[in-house]
Image: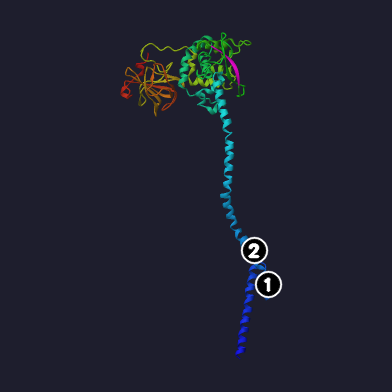
Amino acid sequence: MKQSKKWIALALVCSQFLTTIPASAALVGPEDTTESIPPEEQSPATPEDQESQPSEPPEEAPTETVNPPVEEGPAVPEVPEEIPEESTTEPKPEDPAPIDPPKEETKPAPTPQSDQSTNQEATSETVQPAPVENQCSTLPELTESTPAESNQSTGIEITPVRETWDFIKEIGEDARKIGLEEDLYGSIMIAQAILESASGQSKLSQAPYHNLFGIKGKYEGKGVTFKTQEDDGSGNLYTIDATFRQYEDYEANIKDYAKLLKEGLAHDNDFYKGTWKSETESYEDATEFLTGRYATDIQYGEKLNALIEAYALTSYDKEKAELPEGNDEMIYPVSNPVVSSSFGPRGGGFHRGVDFAASLGTPISASLAGTVIRSEYHASWGNYVAIEHENGLTTLYAHNNQNLVTVGQTVEQGEIIASMGSTGNSTGPHLHFEVSLSPSLAQDQLIDPMTVLPK
């Protein structure tokens, strides 16, 4: 009995051992083939198959069991992994690429730009002594006012400047005298001189040439050659070398120019007849006639008209007005004074000075020599200038279009200090002129300007 019990116990142990082998062997196969082998097909496997499968799958199992997680795992992270690679690693090699081309593109760019600017500067220097149609582009009063309108047919505006006033004062009386003698407009000759010579700043207009009008050829055997620009009649400029006449002074130049207008050209004595006073209704007719005839600039007449209006040059088309005899110390601040409002009570208030009416841009002169104590803007006076004089008086000039003097500046009697305007509390161009017994300009110190001006 004891021996039979031992065999029974041994049989039970062996049966348990045999049942544990297929369990371990079955776990290997299904893990390797869970995606391709359904569970119901796995159960019929025999112990021999189950025992033999573990020997083969161990070689494939590692690859098959590893591959699915590699294929499935990276499939999700591949997107975030590629994005950082593009944003971190790819820009590193690409960053130099976009930077370098601009460097290569910008390096040659300044070269043509600098060449162009150099050429422009060179052109402007060589064109300075050019005829009027070329000088107009260098005038500050034309370029500063309407740089964008230079190609338009209308709308040319000019802001008077002190340098041009001084230039007008230098040649104005010669132009007036010769114009009256030769039946020509002194205003047009002055405007042409401003336009052609850049207010006497061009090299051709200065000593020793004194050619204000860009007249070509030789005068009494004397001439000088400069580069100049011409307009082809359509607004396009081209550069040529030309010989210009040389004069001993401005008066000789203006006389020669007047002779040219009166005698015309060799093949046509009446070539400039349309500029004569006797042949025109106004200076506008003459400036229109000159356009395309004396100058190729298609805006020539418009520019001349703008200059004549801005600087009130029509006063040079008639005899100079002589101031009436009277107080020798003070002079009128404007030529041909027209009083539009007197000193004293006016309406419900008090008018502090005298108003002189004239066109916009008319030059305003200092009534006496003195020192400028104010040159500024006031809500009522607009642009105004105040000058203190040695005799104790102080004069004030208000509603100016532009002040041409600064505080502390010493001015001479008759020196142009401003241009007439309508700034501040004003309804039209005029000069409000005050005379005060003290620099305070207090109302109780004011006197009637007409009592100290020439009678």
Q: In terms of secondary structure, where does tag 2 sit? A: helix
Q: Position of residue 156 (x, y in %)?
A: 53, 25
Q: Quadrant of the C terminus?
A: top left
Say few, some or many: other residues with alpha carbon within 10 Å of mark 1 (under 14 / 14 to 19 / 20 or more): few
The stretch in magenta equals 239-246
Along the horizontal axis of the image, is 140 left or right of 32? Answer: left
Q: Amino acid at mark 2?
A: Thr
Q: In terms of secondary structure, where does tag 1 sit? A: helix
Residues marked 1 and 2 touching at CB (< 8 Å): no
Residue 366 vs residue 127, the one in the foreground:
127
Residue 214 vs residue 348, the one in the foreground:
214
Q: Position of residue 176 (x, y in %)?
A: 49, 12
Along the horizontal axis of the image, is 447 left or right of 216? Answer: left
Q: Amino acid at mark 1?
A: Ser
Residue 223 vs residue 143, the one in the foreground:
223
Q: Which residue is mark 1?
A: 52
Say few, some or many: other residues with alpha carbon within 10 Å of mark 2 (under 14 / 14 to 19 / 20 or more): few
Q: Which residue is mark 2?
A: 63
The chosen color scheme is rainbow
- Residue at the image point whose x is 63% and y is 72% from the top: 27
Along the horizontal axis of the image, is 33 left or right of 390? Answer: right
Q: Quadrant of the N terminus?
A: bottom right
- Residue at the image point whose x is 62% and y is 84% from the top: 10
- Label the magenta part by its dominant secondary structure: strand
- Which quarter of the figure has residue 72? bottom right
